Image (cartoon, rainbow, N blue to C red):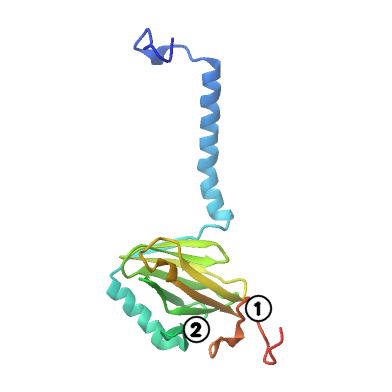
Amino acid sequence: MSSILPPSSRVWWNQPLDRVEGTWIALALIWCLAMFFMMPYWHIFGKQNLSNEAYRITAEAYSKKTQEMVDKFTVRTETELNVPVVHPPAGSDVYLIARLWQWWPILELEKGQAYRLHLSSMDYMHTFSLQPENLNIQVMPGYEGVYTVTPTRAGKYSVLCNEFCGIGHHTMVSNLYVVEKGQGGTGDDSVKDNGEHKDERGEK
């Protein structure tokens, strides 16, 4: 048999299997099975994938829920756009809107407390990228993704969009604050830019 010429017998699958061919088929099958079982294993024990819920929702309905949270839990505003910073109670649902080219509002969460983080887009596909944690979550229009998160380190984090969304894509940057339990809520001086906290005298 030649790789250039057709086989002498058209019923090629009845031909005896060469030992080398069988070895490679067996290795490929074993590797596929290993990868198949590793995916659920790493999802459960690897701690790099967030389990989520997803629901269909309109932009108007999601925006209304986000606004209700902002009206209840805003503690201050930041940037020249006066973006509200919300400090919701521990264990509550928190909402974040992605839209051209802004994350809204700014979230302030407490270390060691679990939250249900809701994400949705008002226009196009975006990606919620939390740095320096290297966490990336796709944010889709028409869908509300819900993720249970528990911040483990206090500090100031950056929220970026990793999905190109137009000419202002590079400006789609925001902050997310994680504060010690009982701190925050009145001003942003409780968190330094390097992610370390100060006491009332300004000392670490």
Q: Is residue 201 above or below residue 23?
A: below
Distance of label 1 from label 2 (alpha carbons):
19 Å
- Asked if one can make out residue 182 in the rendered structure from this viewpoint, the answer is no
On the image, which quarter does residue 177 sit in?
bottom right
Q: Position of residue 154 (x, y in %)?
A: 61, 76
Q: Residues within 10 Å of mark 1 (few under 14, many from 20)?
A: some
Mark on residue 87?
2
Residue 78 numbered mark, or none: none
Q: Residue at x 32, y 70 (%)?
A: 122
Query: Is 68 on the left-hand or right-hand side of 186?
Result: left
- Secondary structure type for disc 2: loop
Residue at the (51%, 49%) spot, across then down: 40
Q: Quadrant of the C terminus?
A: bottom right
Work out whether residue 121 can be spotted.
yes
As drawn, the residue found furthest toward the front would be 167
Q: Which residue is label 1 attached to?
A: 196
Pick the quarter of the image with the N terminus: top left
Q: Quadrant of residue 192?
A: bottom right
Residue 96: image quadrant is bottom left
For residue 43, side relative to residue 5 (left or right): right
Q: Amino acid at mark 1?
A: Glu
Disc 1 or 2, which lies upstream in sequence?
Answer: 2
Residue closer to the observer: 105 or 3: 3
